[in-house]
Image (tube, rainbow, N blue to C red):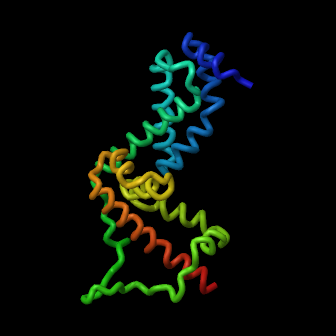
């Protein structure tokens, strides 16, 4: 097993084998986290690569009393958040077709479930989790990022707004729209499962 202090010493001294060892040790976990955050394997690889570049540039500034993996992990998360901010700033794709529709009296037109299953029942159904993840991944990046940080990572709305450099009101609107879109995507899936 690699001694973290020894690894850091070797990294600081410029030992190329130590950097390769760092990639071997932490690469899979970093890539998994980046893919979870970004939902795009290519962007995840780019962020992991950017993380390695930042580690290489800044290893001399690493405080030896800190945990090397925590430091590298934080660099990766910051790289992913930077990518998410860029996506949020880009022109948002239209979500009109994913929003609920209403009649002239303001009543929702989509069919409603007779009884809504509990969250536990939905998650217990075979494959439900994969369908939810796929539905989240199908959302436009700006919506997906807000939903991921708020509902999956568990950050509060103000933190998400700060992370993505958005106003609080814009964050709330995107979160509301993302949840509404996700509901519209998943309703037919779970309605079909309930009938079968």
Q: How many marks?
A: 0
Instruction: Compare residues 77 and 24 and report the one nearer the observer.
Output: 77
Q: Residue drawn 44% across and 87% down?
A: 111
Q: Is residue 145 left or right of residue 13?
A: left
Q: Is residue 92 left or right of residue 34?
A: left
User: Considering the image in quadrants, where does the N terminus appear?
Assistant: top right
Instruction: Compare residues 158 and 192 and report the one nearer the observer.
Output: 158
User: Considering the image in quadrants, where does the C terminus appear?
Assistant: bottom right
Q: Residue drawn 62% across and 69% down?
A: 123
Whether 100 is drawn above or below 137: the answer is below
Q: Position of residue 137 (x, y in %)?
A: 48, 58
Q: Residue drawn 56% across and 10% down?
A: 13
Seen from this angle, which residue lies furthest right?
1
Q: Residue drawn 39% across and 64% down?
A: 178
Seen from this angle, which residue lies furthest left?
104
Whether 195 is drawn above or below 130: the answer is below
Q: Position of residue 168 (x, y in %)?
A: 29, 54
Residue 95 figure quarter: bottom left
Residue 146 figure quarter: bottom left
Whether 2 is drawn above or below 38: the answer is above
Seen from this angle, which residue lies furthest top?
13
Q: Position of residue 105 (x, y in %)?
A: 26, 89
Instruction: Compare residues 123 and 16 and report the one nearer the observer.
Output: 123
Q: Is residue 5 left or right of residue 150?
A: right
Q: Position of residue 81 (x, y in %)?
A: 41, 42
């Amino acid at each position: 097993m690699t001694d973290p202090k020894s690894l850091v010493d070797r990294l600081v001294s410029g030992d190329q084998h130590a950097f390769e060892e760092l990639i071997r040790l932490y690469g899979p976990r970093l890539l998994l986290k980046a893919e979870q955050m970004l939902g795009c394997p290519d962007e995840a690889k780019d962020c992991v690569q950017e993380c390695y570049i930042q580690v290489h540039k800044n290893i001399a500034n690493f405080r030896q009393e800190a945990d090397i993996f925590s430091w590298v992990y934080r660099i990766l998360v910051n790289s992913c958040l930077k990518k998410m901010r860029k996506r949020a700033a880009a022109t948002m794709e239209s979500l009109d077709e994913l929003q609920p529709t209403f009649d002239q009296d303001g009543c929702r037109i989509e069919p409603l479930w007779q009884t809504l299953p509990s969250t536990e029942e939905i998650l217990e159904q075979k494959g439900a989790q994969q369908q939810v993840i796929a539905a989240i991944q199908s959302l436009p990046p700006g919506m997906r990022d807000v939903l991921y940080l708020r509902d999956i990572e568990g950050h509060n709305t103000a933190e998400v707004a700060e992370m993505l450099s958005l106003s609080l009101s814009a964050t709330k609107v995107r979160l509301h729209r993302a949840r509404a879109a996700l509901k519209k995507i998943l309703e037919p899936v779970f309605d079909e499962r309930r009938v079968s």
